[in-house]
């Protein structure tokens, strides 16, 4: 395993990165040299093609494509994949990391499908952003106090740094930025948060709610047992 500027390059992250770049190079050739959009039409997620067209593979395949007209699209996604994904892979292992990455990507794709059927049924969506945002959320929960040097100069804790990409996603959503799939970004974050916290399991949610209710009840009981006017003699409770 290699380390670059303090960040590791792990095996599964490297494989995912290579696949994405290789697919993007093929896209460049097909779109700009062969002058056809057929691969994007087949593999990017277009809600009306998923159903009723039955292109049911698209919520999986869309996450391996990137815009052939925008270098920054793939560059930023692969940068965040390396920054956040490698540390998670070291902590979880390659197989668990791959499962998490795919769950986030497919979950974001299904979110795109559902929202797209309502608002944009014929607009194709492509890119790994949904899966990447899932990694960002997981990294913030798993390593909240890990230091990152923003622009190589300003030290920030992980829990503060991740607010930057999350803030961009929320800002894009509020301003309705064109050319951005808000459903993919928000869906990936939601799936990542549910998976990393375990709140996708009903029993975990039930235990958390019960714990909250018991704590609240205990505070009420403690408040009712405290004399309102303090102890005898005009002193104060410590």
Image (cartoon, rainbow, N blue to C red):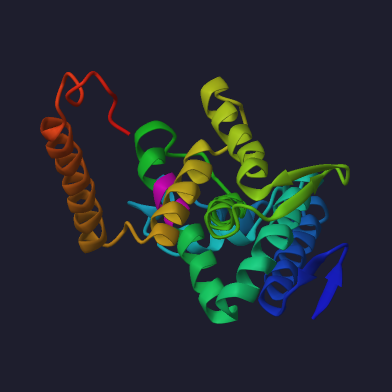
Specify whether residue 3 is painted magenta.
no
The quadrant in which the N terminus is found is bottom right
In-image side of 51 versus 18 (left or right) = left
In-image side of 39 versus 17 (left or right) = left
The residue at the point 54 percent across, 51 percent down is: 137
The quadrant in which the C terminus is found is top left
Where, by quadrant of the figure, is residue 9 drawn? bottom right
Q: Where is residue 89 in the image (x, y as percent from the top left)?
A: 62, 73
Residues shaded magenta? 107-112
The residue at the point 28 percent across, 30 percent down is: 237
Task: Count all numbered tags in the image, as a single digit.
Answer: 0
Q: Which of 170 and 25 is in front in this view?
A: 170
Q: Nearer the viewer, residue 177 or 219?
A: 219
Specify whether residue 111 is painted magenta.
yes
Instruction: Note whether residue 67 is visible.
Output: yes
The residue at the point 73 percent across, 52 percent down is: 147
Instruction: Note whether residue 70 is visible.
Output: no
Q: Position of residue 11 (x, y in %)?
A: 71, 79
- In the displayed orientation, state which residue is furthest to the front: 233
Q: Which of 138 and 238 is in front in this view?
A: 238
Q: Where is residue 235 in the image (x, y as percent from the top left)?
A: 27, 23
Q: Position of residue 150 (x, y in %)?
A: 80, 43
Q: Main secondary structure of the magenta part?
A: helix
The residue at the point 33 percent across, 51 percent down is: 52
Where, by quadrant of the figure, is residue 28 drawn? bottom right
In-image side of 14 versus 221 (left or right) = right
In-image side of 137 versus 74 (left or right) = left
């Amino acid at each position: 395993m290699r380390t670059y500027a303090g960040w590791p390059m792990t095996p599964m992250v490297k494989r995912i990165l290579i696949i994405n770049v290789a697919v993007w190079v093929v896209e460049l050739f097909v779109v700009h040299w062969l002058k056809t959009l057929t691969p994007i039409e087949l593999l990017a997620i277009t809600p009306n093609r998923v159903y009723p067209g039955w292109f049911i593979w698209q919520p999986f395949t869309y996450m391996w494509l990137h815009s052939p007209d925008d270098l920054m699209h793939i560059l930023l996604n692969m940068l965040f994949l390396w920054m956040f994904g490698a540390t998670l892979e070291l902590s979880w292992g390659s197989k668990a990391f791959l499962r998490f990455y795919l769950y986030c990507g497919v979950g974001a794709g299904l979110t795109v499908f559902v929202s797209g059927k309502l608002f944009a049924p014929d607009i194709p969506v492509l890119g790994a952003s949904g899966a990447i945002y899932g990694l960002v959320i997981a990294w913030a929960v798993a390593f909240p106090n890990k230091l990152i040097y923003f622009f190589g100069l300003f030290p920030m804790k992980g829990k503060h740094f991740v607010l930057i990409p999350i803030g961009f996603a929320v800002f894009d959503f509020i301003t309705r930025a064109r050319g951005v799939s808000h459903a993919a970004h928000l869906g990936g974050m939601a799936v990542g948060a549910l998976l990393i916290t375990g709140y996708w399991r009903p029993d975990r949610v039930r235990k958390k709610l019960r714990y909250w209710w018991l704590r609240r009840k205990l505070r009420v009981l403690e408040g009712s047992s405290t004399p309102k006017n303090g102890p005898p003699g005009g002193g104060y409770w410590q």
